[in-house]
Image (cartoon, rainbow, N blue to C red):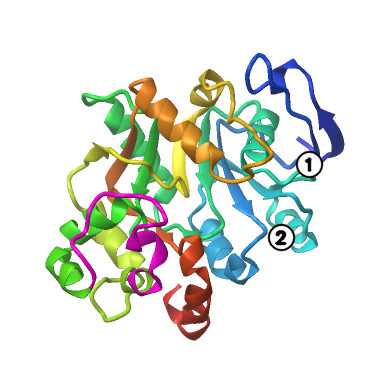
Amino acid sequence: MGMTKLHKTLSDKKWQMTEKQRMKCHFEFKNRSKGLEKMVMMLSGYKDYLYDPVFKRLKAYLPDDIDVCIITSGKFLDEIDKLCEKEGWSYLSTKENHVSLVQNVAISLHSDARFIYKLDEDIFICEGFFERLMRAYEHAKEGQYEPGVIAPLIPVNGYGHVRVLEKLNLTDKYTELFEKPVYAAGPEHIIENSADVARFFWGEGGYVPSIDEINRRFGEDPLEERACPIRFSIGAILFERSLWEEMHYFSVNMRYPIGTDEEDICAWCVNSSHPLMVSENLIVGHFSFGPQNAAMREYFDSHKDIW
C-alpha cells in the first residue's frame, strides 16, 4: 500500500463502546502498512529520553512479517513522524488524549491484522521477543487454558517480579533488602512506588543480571506459561483481533484517559475464562511506574550503558 494521510472524524455505529455510548475522535494517520497478519502498536510521545534505546531495540528485533504503527495520544510529534517515515512505519496521532481510544483507532485501521502486539514506550524488548511470544501463545493454547492474552515476564511488574526473583534464586535477598515479595499490583505496593526496587531490578547492587542475559537463560528452559491471578500491567502483550472485537473494543471514558484498556483486558480475561497468561521463557524490561519515574530518569542519565 502507498502512504496516505488522513484527517477524519469517527462517530458511527462501529465506534460505539456499548449500545448506548458513542465516541468521536479526530486523528491523523500516515499509512505505511503492508497489510500483514501481525502488527505491533507502540504507544509513544511522553518519554522522549527513552526514544533512542527503545526504538533501537524495536528495530533490531523486529521480524519482516510484522507491520509497525507508532501511536501518540493527544498530540502529533514531528520527531515521531520523521522516525516513522525513515523506518517505513505507520504513524497515528489523535487530537483527543485517551490511550484506549487511540488503540481502538489503530486496530481498526489495520484491518488485515489478526495478531496485535501492544507495547508501551518504556518497554525494552529483547532478542526473539516477537517470535517467542507468539510461540508461547500457541503453546499455551495446547494446555489446560484457553488464553486470551499472552505476556512476557516483566521484572518491574506486580506479577513478574515474584517469578523473576524465584527463577534467579533472589527471593531471600529481596526479602532482606526490601520485603517478602508477593503477587500484588497497585501504587500502594513497593514494586510500583519504590525507585530503589526499580533500580534493583535494573541491576543496582549487582544481583539481577541484564535483561538480555536473563532472556537468554530463560529461553533455555522448557516451554511453560502460567495464568496470572492478579491485575497485570499490560506494557507488553499479544492478543488476537477477535478478543478486541468480542470485547466491543476498549471502553472510552474521557474522564479517565489512561488505564481503562488494562482494566478492560484483565476483567474480560477473567470473566470470559480466557486468562491472561505469562511466558516463563522470555523477558522484557519495564523502565518504571509513575511514582518511580523522576528518580529513574536520574538513574537512566547516569547509567546509559545498561539500556
Residue with the mark numbered 2: 83
Which portion, as a residue range, is magenta? 178-197
Q: CA distance from mark 1 to mark 2?
A: 14 Å
Residue with the mark numbered 1: 29
Decide which of 254, 110 is in the foreground and name it.
Answer: 254
From the image, give the main secondary structure of the stretch colored magenta. Answer: loop
- Residue 94's tag is none
The amino acid pointed to by label 1 is Phe
Q: Is residue 50 above or below residue 30?
A: below
Looking at the rendered structure, the secondary structure element under dot 1 is strand
Answer with left or right where residue 182 lies relative to residue 269: left
Query: Mark 1, residues whose alpha carbon is within 10 Å: few (<14), some, or many (≥20)?
Result: many
Residue 182 part of the magenta segment: yes
What residue sits 65% from the left and 26% below the top? 111
Looking at the rendered structure, the secondary structure element under dot 2 is helix
In percent of width and height, residue 99 lies at: 63, 44
Q: Is residue 127 above or below residue 178?
A: above
Answer with left or right where residue 141 lies relative to residue 29: left
Labels 1 and 2: the sequence-earlier one: 1
In percent of width and height, residue 10 lies at: 79, 28
Residue 169 appearing in the image: no
The amino acid pointed to by label 2 is Leu
